[in-house]
Image (cartoon, rainbow, N blue to C red):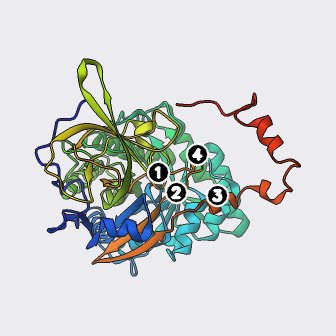
Amino acid sequence: MRVPAPDGQSELDPGIWPRTAERDAASGSLVIGGCDIRQLLTDFGSPLFVLDEADFRSRARQFRKGFGAGADSSTSDSPNVYYAAKAFLSVTVARWAFAEGLGIDVSTGGELACAVRAGVPGSHLIMHGSNRSVDETRAAIAADVGVIVIDSFEDIAKVAFCANEVGRVQPVLIRVTVGVEAHTHEFIATAHEDQKFGFSIAAGDALEAARRVVDVPDLRLLGFHSHIGSQIFVPDGFELAARRVVAFMALVRDELGVTTTHLDLGGGIGIKYLPADQPLALPEFARQVRGWVVEDCEHHDLPSPELMFEPGRAVIGPSMVTAYTVGTVKPVELDGGEIRTYVSVDGGMSDNIRPALYDAEYTVTLASRVSEAEAMLCRVVGKHCESGDIVIKDCWLPSDLAVGDVLAVAATGAYCRAMASNYNLVPRPGVVAVSEGRAQVVLRRETVEDLLALDAGLDEPSPSGGREGFARNGPEGNDSQGVTE
């Protein structure tokens, strides 16, 4: 869908950009956390992820206040709100989340190791994973992870076996699917029946899973976990999920004689990527959720459970922007004589795969200056050998845009650096945190040497003649690389 031309190209929508983002009064350059975007690229290279520390911390506090008990992380045995590490995790971010009273939701051995290395105690960790290995399960139990989420019948046996090895009774939640069709992209909807996560309540698998967990002395069933999807703007799905899980808790009590004490409703709250997006109002939504659960617990004569939540995108997403440098500006005439200008930047699908994967849309602005030039229809594309390497499909940028200008794409904190790749052997950008005029490296920029360090072929002697090997497998041979554009 063609986006309308903006009234003010340099304006920064406060619902989309980080809370400290502003324009420098003299130059018009984008400033985040008191740091000029141009200087950041000079100091740390382009492209670059810029993370607003104050924005992240303030959103973490909002979630703790809205959904959690409000207790300080240093005195609470376990939190109610867990930052979803899959959105983006580093040692620095894990420490920020913990300092603001959040736990960390991890799903792999790597995420677990990062949180542990950051000093987050096991009581503040929850471990997911739809195919967690035995080694990852052992690592979680060794780290005294507070809760492990069970996702399959095999998982029950796996967690019980690893807990028995060390003589521990491991607290667990069972992930259930509630048959809710979330209003979001198919690939990020996770509570309908036809998908890989959890146990179906409707099919009876969830009750059988609960029966098996209760029968195993090495496991302690705390309750149930439900996650209906991501980037959700309407509360209806959350309400239906909450009510169905509470009804299931009553069924477990009646059938198995077990009263569970915890209900984890996952995450999935959407953020504003475009001006038309309307995210849920956090305080009101938190009150609604608690109201639904309390009401249905009273109906089923159940004690109200400890509520748990796992926001990721809603905490980190708006806190980060990606800054790119323009490399080419290429006007292309479309049918009917309209001109679309292809603006190529020095990153692309290797640092943001979401447009190609989900048709995700973003907001972009000219970040190195302010322009009064007429707006032109643009497509911001990356440097990779793919026609689908599109950062922003349709947008309006100033018609005097030139090579060397800096573009900033908003709300790239969630799933951009976390899903980044080395496609075309392009090193991944660095991440820099900014606060009160200071910049701190969170993840350093990769180099080509970093990539080659993994190549075992460098440890072998070069083939004789060198050039002969290239001719056999290179552009002139039958095994040359296929064209993917």
Secondary structure of residue under mark 3: helix
- The image quarter in which residue 239 lies: top left
Secondary structure of residue under mark 1: loop
Secondary structure of residue under mark 2: loop
Q: Do the CB atoms of the residues marked 1 and 4 lie less than 8 Å apart?
A: no
* Residue pointed to by mark 4: 424
- First in sequence: mark 1 vs mark 4: 1
- First in sequence: mark 1 vs mark 3: 1
Height in image: 188 above or below 64?
A: above
* Residue pointed to by mark 1: 351
The crowding category of the residue bearing disc 3, from other C-alpha atoms within 10 Å (few below 14, some 14 to 19, many at least 20), is some
The amino acid beneath tag 1 is Asp
- First in sequence: mark 3 vs mark 4: 4
Total marks drawn? Answer: 4
Front disc: 2 or 4 = 4
Q: Do the CB atoms of the residues marked 2 and 1 lie less than 8 Å apart?
A: yes
- First in sequence: mark 2 vs mark 3: 2
* Residue pointed to by mark 3: 451
